[in-house]
Image (cartoon, helix red, strand yellow):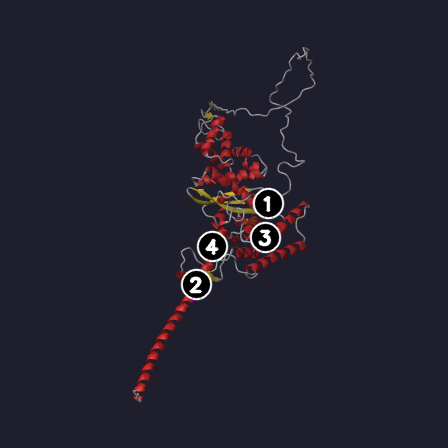
Amino acid sequence: MNILTIEEHNTIIAELIEKHDDEAAKDRAAIDALTKENALLKDELEILKKTVAALTAKVEELEAKSKKNSKNSSKPPSSDGMKKPKATQSMRETTGRASGGQKGHPGANLELKDQPDEVVVLQLKDICECGGKIQVNEGIIEKRQVTDIEPSKVITIEYRAKEGKCEICGKVHKASFPEGLNAAAVYGPGIQAVLTYMINYQHLPLERAAEFAKEIYGIDLSQGTIIRASKEVFDKLEEVDPLIKEEVINSDVAGFDESGMRVAGSLHWLHCAATKDAVYYTIHKKRGKEGMDAAGILPNFKGTAIHDHWKVYYKYTNCAHGECNAHHLRHLVFLSDVMGQVWATEMICLLLRIKAHVDYSRLFDANELGGEDIEKYEGMYRAVIASGAEAIGIANPYGAVDPDQNQDNTIDIDNSTTVSSVKTKRRKKTESERMLIRLAQYEQETLMFMYDFDVPFDNNITEASIRMPKLHQKISGCFRTKDGADVFARIRSFIGTAKKKGKNIMEGIRAALDGHGADFLYPGTN
């Protein structure tokens, strides 16, 4: 048996310790590597969690966006495509009455005329079937009338200007032709008025307007003639245009809106200002303040401007503002039906309840709500917003930041985002947050219809005025020139204002051609 010496024993122990230390060092290095790898995995896991959360939010946002339509958002009806929303989604209140004329309504039945243009006497036969002679009762006559039209008659008036010479000085004198008769053969104001009416009010394209004139009147005219007829009316309305603008500027309440129009192959904007008695259109290259300033109404308007929530309108501080609650209701319907927000349903009910109270008060000639009612509704309004904020986990919006600004930092991604490229960006507020903050910060503008009975609940008057020019573009296509667009805007302002005042449009166009357009809209002007 070999006995180790102390030196040998110590050597073996030293080798074992060294081997152990090497293995321990390797273990520590492995542990450190695993620790670092674990930390990296944790970081990647956090990034993946945030990415999944961001993607989930993005999916929810896109799904919600796909469910938007003209009934629950500000999207136009044309964007609905083949998937039209059900008519039952309309925010109009049901009256409970059957459709059609109501009991006691005077109606518009065709009545017998006292002086018919032609009388046809229907004679009896002389002999009855039994062979007896028929005695006519002269005092008993049953009358029935047919109202019809004859084929349109075109007349040609020839003017012959006489000429003479002064016996003393020999000067030649010639009779003057009527104004507008500046060529050997021209079309008169009657056909000019009809053509202007057809293309600017009935929205006929030029080709169909020419076809109309040929089929109805037997006149074969060019499209250029139709354009010149509208240009003639445009020129004659030069004095009327500022009068319409002035009426809108001086009104207590006016609605404002704008919509895209294609002019000369590029996007322009139709700006509209409307009251219950007048409407004024302009077409400009710019949508915002530049276009509104060019229209010349908002910079001088001192009443209450009704509009949607577009911030450009609030740059005009010389007037009060009221927001269109039809827009609010559509957004709230989306939040209620699609996003399941209970507070949105409560706000819809509250706004409609206040509207019903205001409408009912008007029936009794009241011009304001009582102070207690206003206080109660304001309290209910703020309570709904507070409960909505609590439900979605945000602070009470009263005193919050502007809804169009993002303040909190969070993960926001787009379709090209990868885990390694995710960056921290300002969080995009949800639609619920933005709506709650808007309703809080613009409480007075939202409830303006409650404070002032002259202010409407919505901006439907202006939106309805926008609808006809949009229909014109849909039927007749875009305007080829800016001058053509301006001609349409001025004539349409005149036609729209005449219609609001209950005046005959054809008579108005004819009056304009005769130089009496101003007196037609505003009697006593001339």
- Is 97 in front, or is 197? 97
Query: Which mark, residue 170?
Result: none
Q: Is residue 135 above or below residue 495?
A: above
Mark 4 packing: few (<14 Cα in 10 Å), some, or many (20+)?
A: few
SS type, badge 3: helix
Q: Main secondary structure of the magenta part?
A: helix
Q: CA distance from mark 3 to mark 4?
A: 24 Å
Which residue does the image show at 59% across and 25% down from the upper left? 147
Q: Is residue 526 visible to the viewer in this orientation of the structure?
A: no
The x and y percentages for residue 130 are 68, 12
- Nearer the N terminus, badge 1 or badge 4? 4
Mark 4: amino acid: Val
The x and y percentages for residue 201 are 52, 36
Classify the position of the C terminus by image quarter. top right
**Residue occupied by mark 2:** 47
Q: Nearer the viewer, mark 3 or mark 4?
A: 4
**Residue occupied by mark 1:** 92
Q: Is residue 105 above or below residue 245?
A: above
Query: Which mark, residue 345?
Result: 3
Q: Nearer the viewer, mark 1 or mark 4?
A: 4
Mark 3: amino acid: Thr
The x and y percentages for residue 247 are 57, 43
Asked whether, in this view, residue 503 is left or right of residue 473, the answer is: right
The residues colored magenta run: 42-48
- Nearer the N terminus, badge 4 or badge 2? 2
Tag 1–tag 3 contact (CB < 8 Å): no
Query: Which mark, residue 59?
Result: 4
- Nearer the N terminus, badge 3 or badge 4? 4
Q: Is residue 370 visible to the viewer in this orientation of the structure?
A: yes
- Nearer the N terminus, badge 2 or badge 3? 2
SS type, badge 2: helix
